[in-house]
Image (cartoon, grey):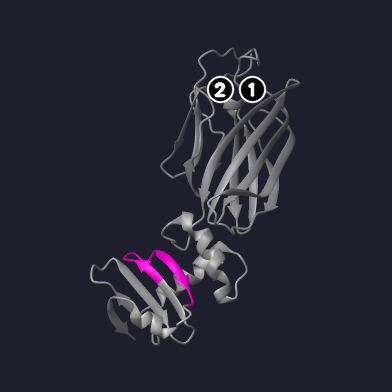
Amino acid sequence: MKKFYSLIISAFLFLSSFNLSLADSIDSNTKALVDEDENFVLIINDKNTNENDISSYNLLNHVVFEEKRSGDYTEVIVRNRSSYKLTNASIKLNIDRYNENGRWIGVRTNTYSGVNISPGTSKSLGKKYDPLKYGFERIRGTISVVASGKNYQRSATRERINNPYRWKNIRTLADHTKRHSKDFGLSYNEMEYSKRANQLWGKRTSKGYQYKVDSRGETIRVYHPATNSFGSYDLYGRTKTYYKPSRGKAYFDSQPGILHKN
């Protein structure tokens, strides 16, 4: 008799590098949550399982796909925790970005697959170049597992937030990048643009930089005269906007707040 594996909890996707939030659920028998590490998982409850009958044995409860990032590459590993040999296991990820018009547009599709994965084993499905360029993405994933000649599938949607440089409202980053990244000689890249903004904040107390704190202490405006770089931040240094004002220093001088020079 095949070894019976626990049917209480199993994961569809485990992503260790990103902050994620649930976009939708799968069906009435599926619960979705964000765990303590803010990683997307699915918990599936299957009450009617016969370990000798693959049609009632919920195979997808026992197949785990893990997405891991290293630099500009993503690797997907499949773990077969079921009692059956997987003749094929694949996952297709459609990635959309949230653009400056507040709409989702497709940017790339990654597909990973592997064959002949024995029970209790793991297998890398390969690495793909997957640069972090956008701040707010939606991932639509479909897994397909073939065992005993039958194909089992499930789909899920989630959101991924790439915000290492502390942009205050991630939904506005695309719009600001489109309007202002060219001020700094940048092609469209939300990560590089927000990084530059974060660097200006970090240098606010350096020689040659100026900043103003408004009367409530809620907004801090930073200006670098030598490069005509202006940024507005909240009390915690999260960027609200970043650009080169057309009026230069006169624009900064007209901003409210107590002036600090270095």
Do labels 2 and 1 touch, CB within 8 Å?
yes
Looking at the rendering, the stretch of residues picked out in magenta corresponds to 232-244
Position above or below: 248 against 96: below
Residue 16 visible, this angle: no
Q: Position of residue 132 (x, y in %)?
A: 59, 58
Residue plotted at (46% across, 56% down): 170
Secondary structure of the residue carrying tag 1 is: loop
Residue in view at x 68 percent, y 43 percent = 124
Question: Which quadrant of the figure has residue 121?
Answer: top right
Q: Assign the C terminus to one quadrant of the image.
A: bottom left
Q: Position of residue 28 (x, y in %)?
A: 50, 22
Are there few (<14), some (14-19), or many (20+) residues within 10 Å of tag 1? many
Residue at 44% of width from left, 67% of height from top?
A: 241
**144 and 209: which one is in front?**
209
Earlier-in-chain disc, 2 versus 1: 2
Q: Is residue 192 left or right of residue 147?
A: left
Tag of residue 122: none
Task: Give the SS element for disc 2.
Answer: loop
Q: Quadrant of residue 251?
A: bottom left
**What residue lies at 29% left-to-right and 81% top-to-bottom?**
259
* Marker disc for residue 5: 2
How many numbered marks are there?
Answer: 2
User: Mostly what secondary structure, the magenta segment?
Assistant: strand
* Mark 2–mark 1 distance (CA, rounded to whole Å): 7 Å
Q: Quadrant of residue 179?
A: bottom right
Q: Amino acid at mark 2?
A: Tyr
Q: Amino acid at mark 1?
A: Ser
Observer able to see residue 14: yes
Residue 234 falls within the magenta-colored stretch: yes
Q: Is residue 198 magenta?
A: no
Residue ID for mark 1 = 83
Q: Could you tell me residue 160's position as x and y percent?
A: 52, 48
